[in-house]
Amino acid sequence: MLPELEYLSWIAGRPEAATHDLASSDLRPEGPDDAVVPDPLRDLPAADGRSLEARLADRYDVSPEAVLVTAGATGAVFVAVATALADGERVLVESPGYEPHHATPAGLGATVDRFDRPRSDGYALDPNRVDSALCSETALVAVTNRHNPSGARTDRETLAAVADRATDHGARLLVDEVYGPYAGDGGRGFGGVTAAGLDSAVTVGSLTKFHGLGELRVGWLVADESFVERARRVQQHLGSVARPSRALARRALANADALAEQSRTLAARNGDLLAAFLDERPSLSGHVPAGCPYGLVRHARFDGDDLAAVADCEGGLVVPGRFFGVPDAVRVSLGRSPAEMEAALAAFGRALDGADG
């Protein structure tokens, strides 16, 4: 039986109930909750008749047959894991990391091994650590880029080295890139570093985090055509993406560059707000990677659960780091408007003043 995803269960409904949301890492532009067309797309021109797969293929410089559209990035991870497990019974996952990457394969019957991305190394992805943890039964290596929850970035050369190590053991590399596009480095994909096109690599993306279009529930995976064909057979057992969501996703991709500029500007402004907040509070430590919509924050006396409880005293919502394997920290996210972020950080500050006093 598939296990409960504790973080997704915990976060469900909380952002809507919170007075000050410092938990949502997907950008959430203001607009009516019941709008059929999300506010960021309302005034943008409609797309031409090319399929969603064709538009994504153009972005990644692959054929449409190398793209599979899924119900969100979590759906893409599930399909990728289930497809890969036909070739082995073990999955190797980074630690700390995003819960579905280890809980989903465990629920599908795999043995899950972990390798470290130590804080002392800035949470860097080290190909040698991956190599030492691989074995002949490993079917998949799962990582995030940007790293979730630290925000650390991995360059393509390092990803290629990890993919090579995985290939040497008969495994594939899964790279969850939902937070990658915030960097704006150019190149294929959506502006960040991508593993698309590397041998044996499977990349996952979505319109939720960077484009703030979570209502559409549109994700995808990109891999070689033979893997994608096998993944299509797996997806037959799951729900498909609704036609209206596909149409609106095509509109988003037709205007992706304009949407990207808005997202990067918002993330940068909010990142500056959080960095300034941390500088003013000696009891807190943390780092906000440039262009990242979240950062890990630690308190001198409180662990992550205690710090989340402190924030709640003023109606604030932050994510306890235990959901990612970092129990001494919280993840503070920057998905709302700058005005909302200013109010949220002010409330967090009042709560800290009460706790520290």
Image (cartoon, grey):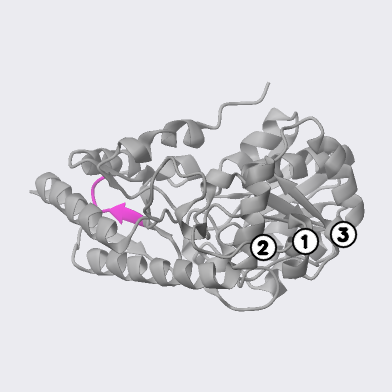
Magenta includes 227?
no
The amino acid beneath tag 2 is Ala
In the image, taking residue 96 as reference, residue 320 lies left or right, namely left
Residue 243 appears in which quarter of the rendering?
top right
Magenta includes 301?
yes
Q: Which residue is mark 3?
A: 168
The amino acid beneath tag 1 is Arg
Residue 138 on image: x %, y %? 80, 45
Q: Residues within 10 Å of mark 1 (few under 14, many from 20)?
A: few
Q: Residues within 10 Å of mark 2 (few under 14, many from 20)?
A: some
Image quarter hosting the N terminus: top right
Q: Front-most of 310 and 30?
A: 30
The residue depicted at 63 percent of the width and 46 percent of the height is 245
Residue 96, numbered circle:
none
The residue depicted at 53 percent of the width and 44 percent of the height is 215
Residue 50, numbered circle:
1
Against 340, residue 318 (above or below) is: above
